[in-house]
Amino acid sequence: MDQDVSQAIFFYNRHPISADIILTKLRASRADLAGLRPEELFPHDQDHYGGVAANDELAKGAAIGKGTRVADFCAGLGGPARYLAHRYDAQVVGIELTPARVAGAQKLTSLVGLQEAVRIVEGNVMAAPLDTESVDVVVSQEALLHVPDRRQALGEAFRVLKSGGRLAFTDWVAHKPLDQEDKDLLWEGQAVQALESPTAYRDLLTSLGFRVRSVVDLTAEWAIILKDRLAMYRRLREETERAGTPSGHDAFYRSYVRFVDLVQQHVLGGVRIFAEK
């Protein structure tokens, strides 16, 4: 388990999207950071596929609105958490494993004045630092792929949700088995654990007591998004190198190119899942 944690932290410490690079880009576009508004962050801080539109899909499906208490599992830099608070007036707590990303998320949240509505705390979603039956919704986006025990993590989601609470998340899935070479590359480059199939995800959630409302295949949509995202990462690598900030390790880029290929081939893909407690 220690190796799993250290590999995930290593990956995100070297990720090309960081608070430092976001702030560098913002400083280049405005005189200073005084009076920074949440919507000015949204083009830069949404480290998931589909940007704010993907957040809207989760919010709609999970009935997030004013006063909804939301837990974001694997919250990263807090982009979705801030969006849900700003756009939907939700109260959001994000659980994030990587200390540097927790610090970055807290800094960005304070800069846009959302610290009363958004808290990003350091923790492991396999032992979420939240009270039992304390939230209305649990969300997560393309992050459970890093979690070594998804049953434990989703069991924690079930525990912290109130009766009738909603689970809404997206994640990588395997439509076909990966060979060992691809498994090793994705582990080295992106800390990817063994992946679920869509059917296995449904069965897992059902066994935990969730009522699964929908499992939507996003693979065709992601095939388009990921091509653009790969081009973005290549641009970011050049920008981060010029700025002197972490630019992602070589294995990340090799694995990402392979990931995009595997999605095009429908070996890997994505799902959006809604379920209720």
Image (cartoon, rainbow, N blue to C red):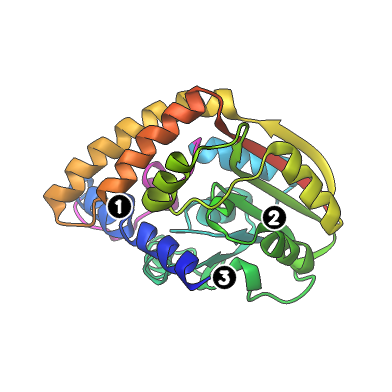
Question: Is residue 185 found inside the magenta-colored segment of the image?
Answer: no
Q: Residue at x 49, y 63 (%)?
A: 114
Task: Read off the residue under disc 2.
Answer: 66
Amino acid type at circle 3 is Asn
Image quadrant containing the C terminus: bottom right
Give how far apart the Cα atoms at labels 1 and 2 are: 28 Å
Main SS, magenta residues: loop
Q: Position of residue 209 (x, y in %)?
A: 87, 57
Task: Label 3, secondary structure: give it.
Answer: loop
Which region is colored magenta? Answer: 31-50
Q: Mark 1 or mark 2: name the one nearer the start of the chain.
A: 1
Residue in the foreground of this view, choosing between 64 and 30: 64
Q: Which residue is mark 3?
A: 124
Q: In whole angstroms, how far apart are the C-alphas of marks 3 and 1? A: 25 Å
Classed neighbour count for the residue bearing mark 1: other residues with Cα under 10 Å, few (<14), some (14–19), many (≥20): some
Q: Tell whether position 49 is magenta.
A: yes
Q: Which residue is mark 1?
A: 22
**Residue depicted at x 60% and y 60%:** 73
Comes first in the chain, label 3 or label 1: 1
Q: Is residue 180 left or right of residue 29?
A: right
The spot of residue 66 in percent (x, y) is 69, 55
Residue 230 percent coordinates (x, y)? 35, 33
* Mark 2 crowdedness (10 Å alpha carbons): few <14, some 14-19, many ≥20: few
